[in-house]
Image (cartoon, grey):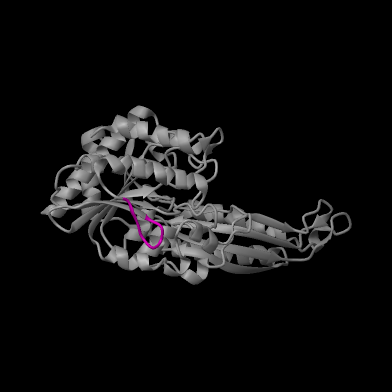
Amino acid sequence: MDASRVISDLRELAALTSTSDGAQRLAWGPVWRDARAWFTRKVAPLGLPVTTDSAGNNWVTIRGASQKSVIVGSHLDSVPNGGWLDGALGVAASIEALRMHAGATPPVTLKLVDWADEEGARFGRSLLGSSAASGSLDLDDVRGLKDRQGTTLPDALAENGVSVERMRDAHQELQAIDARAYLELHIEQGPVLESLGKPTGVVLGTFGVERHMLRFTGQAAHAGSTPIPMRRDAFLAAAQTSLGCREIARRHSAPGAGVVCTVGIVNVEPKIVTAVPGVCEISLDQRALDASVLAAMLLDARGVAARSALENNVTVEWKRLWRIEPRLFDGNLVRLCEESVHEETGDAPRLPSGPLHDAAEMVPLMPVVMMFAYSSNGLSHCKEEDTPEPHLEKTIRAYLRLVEKTVAHVAR
């Protein structure tokens, strides 16, 4: 159980795949392929081959005395100018878990997975490889996706030996595994653990998400000659809706199970300084761990948008972009995770995950739990992403304890 070796591996990967602006392991691109080649080199001394499923997910297997399997892993891809720990921490720590069993026959089979394109940063579809493996991926939703350079997703995948039309075969390939547990280590990507002064957290589940685009349509008009009461200002309706959604999140928040609402995109037409905006589009991302709370938040948001549109004499249309229900983790694995964290750090705070992770896609198929590491200043998806090394070492050791406890639990 060598946490320092995991950290050394992570720094080596960062040096190989980062610039001064941060990590550049964008899925399906050349730097990501360099990261995967690094991964292959790291497991080669164990005498274990790397296999790739139909969705481009990489797998390494140590055969156990039983076909019952514990799956560990995360993802190596990053956002552009991302951090050195996001995703890679879980993969590097899971390589160490394999090292702990190398040269022996564990009581159950141990499998490491490096999921392909967790971030969705290039084509906009997060959890691509894991959703194909879980069976939730709709090929009609992804065939036409293009990146900013105009490259289609099918072409990018083909460059990496993956056929879009065969991606869902990964579901049958995963189902052929007698999977009894999935364990994932990740940085928190938020400020909660830092605010508590704790290095490591136990994750209860991933938030459900409702993601929509709202289009407010009024009338463009001259900014100098249209009196305020006579305007049909689409931007003001969108702005009122955005502020209203912040209040919705505050109203539905509860201790230990906070919710969030975010407007991340604002598009205004005609987008000139002398015109009243006639059209405004905004994105709305709502997240909660409780499905009933998430549904209530969406209903409230629809009401706020309708009232804002009426008050500004505009119309509003909704278009759903994506949704996923809350995914609660397995109670037995949460208990083992708590034990592992408590033994290593003396405390085991519980928290939900606001960001999505590949673990969420595994919940319908097998017992799942995640462990979080402290994120300095709550930052992630940027070059400043970091975890103090003493906290990182404790978290890695706690995760490796969790792997051992889970193997023993599954073997019983």
Residue 53 occupies which quadrant of the picture? bottom left
The C terminus sits in image quarter? bottom left
> Residue at position x 23%, y 37% from top?
342
Question: Compared with residue 361, is residue 90 higher up or lower down, i.e. above or below?
Answer: above
Query: In terms of depth relative to the viewer, which is nearer, 270 or 395?
Result: 395
Q: Residue furthest right?
A: 225
- Residue 140 pos. (x, y %): 50, 71
Q: Residue furthest left?
A: 412
- Residue 340 pos. (x, y %): 22, 40
Query: In terms of depth relative to the viewer, which is nearer, 303 or 78?
Result: 78
Our reading of the magenta stretch's main secondary structure is loop
> Residue at position x 24%, y 55% from top?
181
Q: Quick check: 56 left or right of 93?
A: right
Q: Quick check: 237 left or right of 86?
A: right
> Residue at position x 59%, y 63% from top?
213
Query: In terms of depth relative to the viewer, which is nearer, 113 or 160?
Result: 160
Residue 90 in view (yes/no): no
Residue 146 in view (yes/no): yes
The N terminus sits in image quarter? top left
- Residue 112 pos. (x, y %): 29, 50
Query: Was residue 287 drawn as part of the magenta stretch in this picture?
Result: no
Query: Was residue 54 drawn as part of the magenta stretch in this picture?
Result: yes
Q: Which residues are magenta?
A: 50-57
Question: How many numbered marks appear?
Answer: 0
- Residue 51 pos. (x, y %): 33, 55
Q: Quick check: 151 left or right of 397?
A: right
Q: Residue furthest bottom?
A: 140
Query: In terms of depth relative to the viewer, which is nearer, 91 or 302?
Result: 91
